[in-house]
Image (cartoon, coloured by chain):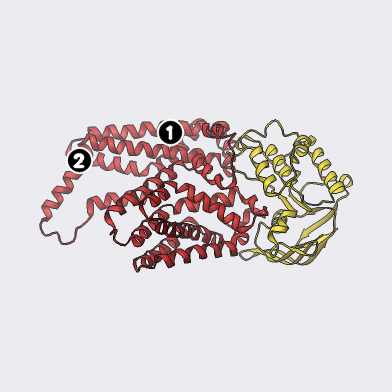
Chain colours: A red, B yellow
């Protein structure tokens, strides 16, 4: 998906044909595109910017590989793949890393090609060598990890929180902080971005509509974390379905989790709107969030299908808000989410049924 | 004690269980069957963890579907391959289970001592070996006031001393607390030690041997 996004953005920059563009002749368009290409290969600022983004990407790759290696189903790699010679292990991991680095390799090849054509190849060559060097370092790290099974055990954060009290509703929050820091940070940044951009772009005359649209945006931005919370419950808290908990208690527990997760957004809500509007919008937020979560109990969707379903729901809710039925939608979503939870919590669909035979 | 009524379960087109009626009285039972015969599925259904067709009744009155809370208060379960969040400690899980299953105060001490677990309970679960994790999950299944305890592959990965301790705990709970046990296991269960009755799961049905 990230590769697709990268390719789309790059092709958009280079090949977009703007509608009704009579002021640019064919030659001018080519010239501007060419200037843009030259910037890519000659501007140190752009090169540093790309380099920093790429470093973030590399850290993400390291995190991904370390997590995958720590998964129980991949433990066999620690006693099988390391029987290969070091050079073979190195070669295999290098291929894995280069595959993960495809977007940046495409960028480097492109800038190298353009640099050779125009004779300005210094930065592209430096950049390509840096990619090669970091790929080598990453590969050495991966090889060490597979040859040392203790590489991915207890983090500093786990040790820090070891004596803290951990009620049920906080478990997913701990999981986020321990395992999903990058998605958490990206989600929160996007969420604040939605509020800031929406605050200036959306008409604030009707505060129900204004708040409703913004909160719908916030919930949609959180949908990946909502999906992860279901995934976490399914795999790590599966035992809890044998607990004699009243369903409303479990529902409230997850609501509490999301209220804490969206605490800054909720504070903004309280500071921006009157108490009645705030309460109504909070109900909308809780109801919509819990619908997005509880449909997973009904369908056990994979991430891709889940995103489609969420998109359809969101468009529907957006239209209802635009028509001014915010109060109705708040109450409807809240009760619908309760209904789904009540009906399907103990009847959850199985994700990978073969594994439990 | 426990009744299975028209219990049917399939994964896609693959039927796993088709039990018209099956009843067990109080005792210790060993469910045997080949790989993929549906032993774990059966135990998960009886624990209320897996959706299925039909019904499971405890003491002829409590249905897993109609009385989910009361049923789960009396039925405990330990998975074959327990998975818990790695950042939690054994102590955290004991607190969580004790609270959920309304365990008497300090009940866990007996199991911790018997299974020799006190050394590592304050460590994060991510650092546990499979044997340590297995013993923890078994101890968690004993918490509360259960009438039925379902143990999926309880004999795997634990050492011989712990195995003996496990047999001791099962025997004690059965004799003193009248707790019924259903153990699904590939390995041979010491039937003489526990006076266990064997049940065979074959062709999607249960048969007492």
Residue B37 shows in the view: no
> Closer to the N terminus: mark 2 or mark 1?
2
- Relative to A208, A144 lies left or right: right
Which x, y percent locates residue B84? Answer: 62, 44
Identify the element where label 2 is drawn: helix
Q: Quadrant of residue A147?
A: top right
Q: Which residue is mark 2?
A: A39
- Decide which of B106, B111 is in the foreground and name it: B106
Q: CA distance from mark 2 to mark 1?
A: 29 Å
The residue beneath circle 1 is A138
Relative vertical location of residue A53 with respect to residue A336 in this rendering, above or below: above
Q: In what quadrant of the picture does the C terminus of chain B appear?
A: bottom right
Mark 2 closeness class: few <14, some 14–19, many ≥20 residues within 10 Å = some
Residue found 12% across the figure and 55% down from its top: A26
Q: In x, y percent, where is residue B102? A: 71, 48
Discs 2 and 1 lie in a common subunit: yes
Disc number for residue B49? none
């Amino acid at each position: 998906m990230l590769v697709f996004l990268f390719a789309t953005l790059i092709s958009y920059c280079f090949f977009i044909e703007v509608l009704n563009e009579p002021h640019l002749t064919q030659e001018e368009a080519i010239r501007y595109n060419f200037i843009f290409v030259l910037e890519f290969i000659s501007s140190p600022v752009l090169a540093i910017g790309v380099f920093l983004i790429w470093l973030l990407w590399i850290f993400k790759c390291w995190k991904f590989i370390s997590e995958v290696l720590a998964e129980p189903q991949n433990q066999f790699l620690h006693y099988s793949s390391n029987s290969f010679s070091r050079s073979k292990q190195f070669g295999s991991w290098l291929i894995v890393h280069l595959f993960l680095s495809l977007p940046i390799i495409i960028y480097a090849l492109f800038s190298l090609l353009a640099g050779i054509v125009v004779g300005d190849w210094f930065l592209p060559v430096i950049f390509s060598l840096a990619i090669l060097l970091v790929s080598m370092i990453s590969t050495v790290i991966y090889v060490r990890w597979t040859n040392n099974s203790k590489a991915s055990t207890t983090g500093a954060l786990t040790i820090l929180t070891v004596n803290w009290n951990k009620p049920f509703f906080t478990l997913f929050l701990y999981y986020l902080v321990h395992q999903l820091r990058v998605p958490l940070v990206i989600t929160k940044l996007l969420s604040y971005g939605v509020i800031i951009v929406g605050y200036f772009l959306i008409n604030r005359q009707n505060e129900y509509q204004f708040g409703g649209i913004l909160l719908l945006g916030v919930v949609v931005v959180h949908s990946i974390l909502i999906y992860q919370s279901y995934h976490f419950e399914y795999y790590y808290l599966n035992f809890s379905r044998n607990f004699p908990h009243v369903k409303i208690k479990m529902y409230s527990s997850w609501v509490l989790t999301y209220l804490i997760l969206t605490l800054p957004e909720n504070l903004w809500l309280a500071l921006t709107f009157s108490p009645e509007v705030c309460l109504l919008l909070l109900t909308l937020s809780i109801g919509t969030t819990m619908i997005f979560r509880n449909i997973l109990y009904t369908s056990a969707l994979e991430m891709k299908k889940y995103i489609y379903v969420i998109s359809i729901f969101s468009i529907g809710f957006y239209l209802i808000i635009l028509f001014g039925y915010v109060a109705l939608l708040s109450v409807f979503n809240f009760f619908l989410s309760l209904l789904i939870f009540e009906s399907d919590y103990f009847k959850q669909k199985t994700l990978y049924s073969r594994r439990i035979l | 004690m426990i009744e299975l009524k028209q219990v049917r379960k399939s994964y896609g087109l693959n039927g796993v269980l088709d039990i018209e009626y099956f009843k067990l009285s109080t005792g210790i039972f060993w469910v045997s069957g080949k790989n993929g015969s549906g032993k774990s599925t059966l135990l998960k259904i009886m624990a209320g963890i897996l959706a299925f067709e039909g019904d499971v009744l405890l003491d002829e009155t409590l249905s897993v579907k109609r009385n989910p809370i009361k049923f789960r208060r009396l039925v405990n379960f330990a998975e074959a391959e327990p998975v818990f969040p790695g950042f939690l400690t054994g102590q955290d899980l004991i607190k969580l289970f004790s609270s959920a299953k309304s365990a008497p105060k300090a009940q866990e001490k007996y199991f911790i001592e018997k299974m020799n677990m006190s050394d590592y309970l304050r460590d994060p679960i991510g650092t546990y070996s499979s044997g340590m994790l297995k013993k923890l999950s078994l101890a968690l299944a004993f918490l509360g006031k259960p009438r039925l305890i379902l143990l999926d592959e309880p004999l795997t990965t634990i050492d011989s001393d712990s195995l003996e301790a496990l047999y001791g705990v099962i025997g004690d709970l059965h004799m003193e607390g009248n707790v019924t046990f259903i153990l699904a296991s590939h390995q041979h269960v010491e039937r003489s030690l526990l006076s266990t009755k064997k049940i065979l799961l074959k062709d999607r049905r249960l048969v007492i041997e």
